Image (tube, rainbow, N blue to C red):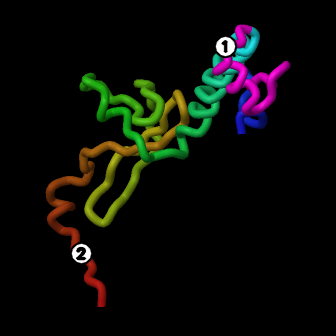
Amino acid sequence: MTDKLCTKYKKSKHAKFSGFSLWKACLEGNQEAWKEMEEYNKLDVLSLEELALKLMPWDNSIDFNLYSSSLENVCGICGSVEFIKKGFTYTSAGKYQRYRCKGCGAESRGQENLLSKEKRKSLRKRTVK
């Protein structure tokens, strides 16, 4: 996927050693293979980081807020602190501000219920028949 989605960093092709032969040559102490492995790994890490940043908005399995000691609102995907308001989210129990991260485009919602106390009291919960 990195060869199709990454624009800044592209994985390098193995110049002299292909596939497992690179690993084997490194294990045998071949310095030329080690140099090729080092160059390959540098670009591999950078291209995978670029790919991860592109795919993060669609992955909700990690919430980086959990690992931040800051009390500031932080995007749980990319760590950005810049958001724009994007309307509201409605549930059966309330109305919440919706936000879009300026860094990665991920959407989130606030936790404060914006309905008045009186309106929340007047809501009826539907029961399933």
Task: Report the residue that reaches farthest toward the front.
Answer: 28
Query: For the residue labelled by badge 2, is the local secondary structure a helix, a strand or a loop?
Result: loop
Q: Position of residue 24 (x, y in %)?
A: 70, 26
Image: 34 above or below 58 = above
Q: Secondary structure at mark 1?
A: loop
The residue sitting at 33% across, 33% down in the picture is: 65
Give residue 26's quadrant in the image: top right
For badge 1, the amino acid type reads: Gly
Q: Is residue 57 above or below residue 79?
A: below
Residue 3, x across and y down, in percent: 77, 33
- The C terminus, quarter of image: bottom left
Image quadrant in which you'd find residue 112:
top left
Apparent side of residue 68 relative to residue 23 in the rendered image (left or right): left
On the picture, is 128 further left or further right than 2?
left
118 vs 63: above or below: below
For this rendering, which residue is in front, 115 or 30?
30
Residue farthest bottom in this picture: 129
- Find the residue positioned furthest to the right: 16
Q: CA distance from mark 1 to mark 2?
A: 70 Å
| CB within 8 Å, label 1 to label 2 | no
Image quarter hosting the N terminus: top right
- In the figure, residue 28 lies in which quadrant? top right
Checking the image for residue 29, the label placed there is 1
Question: What span is colored magenta in the figure?
Answer: 11-31
**Residue drawn at the location 75% of the way across and 10% of the way down:** 32
Which residue corresponds to mark 2? 125
Residue 87 higher or lower than 103, as above or below: below
- Give the crowd class for mark 2: few <14, some 14-19, many >=20 residues within 10 Å: few
Q: Tell me, yes or no, whether the highlighted magenta stretch contains residue 22.
A: yes
> What residue is rendered at 45% in x and 35% in y?
77
